[in-house]
């Protein structure tokens, strides 16, 4: 029986730097741990549709062998929020906007640097837009460091959902 994949959504502003890099990084990590059981998406609260990830974002993600070359930006939608099992906002502003659009999503929405703490207040993941490749590399490594810490908890949540469906 085909189970619904566990869906993780990353939300930033323009959906061309932080959220696609996080999407790429987590996809690489989860492909090793739970292939076929998850889906990672990203969008932006102020994103236009169909833009590629920034050149440096694509470049930085290659460190982990993540391929963002096919990425197309998309604006955050209610349907996407409702479909997701776990949502990460890159800044407190992103978390507020997600919950404003779908108040019921509050219990599955986290500020990226706070997970698994539910507090919407805290430090944002800084936006590297318009900065040098070096800054993007630092941002990607920071994303990777957090995701590495979160991986056991995310895997546990994937297992809880996918095992319940079997």
Image (cartoon, rainbow, N blue to C red):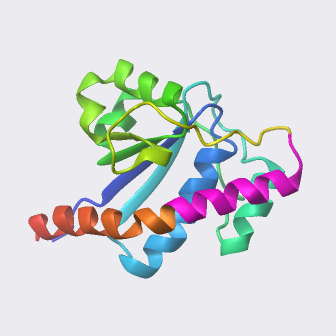
Tell me which residue sits at (61%, 43%) in the image: 125
Q: Is residue 153 left or right of residue 92?
A: left
Q: Is residue 19 left or right of residue 108?
A: right
- Start-end of magenta stretch: 131-146
Q: Is residue 26 above or below residue 8?
A: below
Coordinates of residue 145 in the picture (x, y in percent): 57, 64
Q: Is 14 in front, or is 77?
A: 14
Coordinates of residue 76 in the picture (x, y in percent): 49, 31
| Quadrant in the rendering for residue 131 | top right
Q: Is residue 141 left or right of residue 114?
A: right
Q: Residue furthest right?
A: 132
Q: Is residue 107 left or right of residue 89?
A: left
Do we see residue 58 in this rendering? Answer: no
Tell me which residue sits at (29%, 61%) in the image: 5
Coordinates of residue 114 in the picture (x, y in percent): 43, 45
Residue 141 belongs to the span the image colors magenta: yes
Tell me which residue sits at (58%, 46%) in the image: 19
Q: Is residue 15 above or below residue 55?
A: above
| Quadrant in the rendering for residue 49 | top right
Main SS class of the magenta portion in the image: helix
Quadrant of the drawing holding the N terminus: bottom left
């Amino acid at each position: 029986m085909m189970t619904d994949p566990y869906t993780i959504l990353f939300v930033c502003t323009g959906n061309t730097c932080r959220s696609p890099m996080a999407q790429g990084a987590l996809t690489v990590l989860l492909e090793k741990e739970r292939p076929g059981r998850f889906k990672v998406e990203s969008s932006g609260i102020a994103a236009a549709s169909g833009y590629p990830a920034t050149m440096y974002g694509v470049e930085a993600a290659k460190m982990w062998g993540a391929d963002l070359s096919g990425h197309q930006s998309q604006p955050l939608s209610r349907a996407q929020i409702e479909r997701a099992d776990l949502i990460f906002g890159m800044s407190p502003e992103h978390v507020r906007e997600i919950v404003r659009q779908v108040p019921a999503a509050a219990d599955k929405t986290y500020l990226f640097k706070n997970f698994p703490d539910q507090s919407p207040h805290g430090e944002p993941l800084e936006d590297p837009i318009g900065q040098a490749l070096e800054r993007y590399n630092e941002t990607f490594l920071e994303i990777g460091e957090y995701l590495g810490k979160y991986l056991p908890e995310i895997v546990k949540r994937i297992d809880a959902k996918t095992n319940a469906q079997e």
